[in-house]
Image (tube, grey):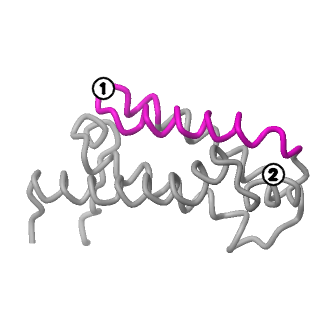
Amino acid sequence: MKTTGSQMLWSGRVLTALFALFLAGASITPKLAGMDVAGDTLRDLGWPVRHALMIGVIELVCLVLYLVPATALFGAVLMTGLLGGAMATQIRVDNPLFSHILFSLYLGLFMWGGLWLRDARLRALFPFRRSAAN
């Protein structure tokens, strides 16, 4: 079954929406609202709680850049850096591999997958090809 451009676009939009809603609800909002869960989490990871607002603003800026089509690639690159820092923090505190350390990788795959599906230029730059069966 061949996938149409419209199906890819809508699949990409769904992945993008899921990524954005998760990030906004689970990470950005708690930090910007000064919720205890954000402070507790940062403290457990060895970060001063006073950095919660700054990290939340950086996450929000990266997310907005990612969601705007004209700046989506730039936002994805910045968000990848942010997710890499989150992964490094999880490694530093020796958290479990699959549930904590690799969680940033899972989010990054969702983010880049959504962008790849909704942007034909990115698909042209990084084509997905099946190898010929021999």
Residue under the image location 37 percent in, 27 percent down: 71
- The chief SS type of the magenta part is helix
Give the SS element for disc 1.
helix
Task: Report the residue at 61% width, 34% height from top.
Answer: 57
Where's residue 92, x and y in %?
88, 55
Q: Quadrant of the N terminus?
A: bottom left
At label 1, counting other C-alpha atoms closer than 10 Å, the crowd grade (few under 14, some 14-19, many 20 or more) is few
Q: Which residues are magenta?
A: 48-75
* Quarter of the image where one finds residue 44: bottom right
Spatial CA distance of label 1 from label 2 is: 31 Å
User: Given the image, on which type of amino acid does mark 1 rest?
Assistant: Ala
Q: What SS does tag 2 mark?
A: helix
Question: Mark 2 packing: few (<14 Cα in 10 Å), some, or many (20+)?
Answer: some
- Assign the C terminus to one quadrant of the image: bottom left
The residue closer to the viewer here, 55 or 74, is 55
Check residue 82 for magenta coloring. Answer: no
In magenta segment, residue 62: yes
Quickly name the residue at label 2: 89
For label 1, the residue is: 70
First reached walking from the N terminus: tag 1 or tag 2: 1
In which quadrant of the rendered view does residue 32 lie?
top right
Image marks 1 and 2: residues in contact by CB distance under 8 Å: no
For residue 13, side relative to residue 56 (left or right): left
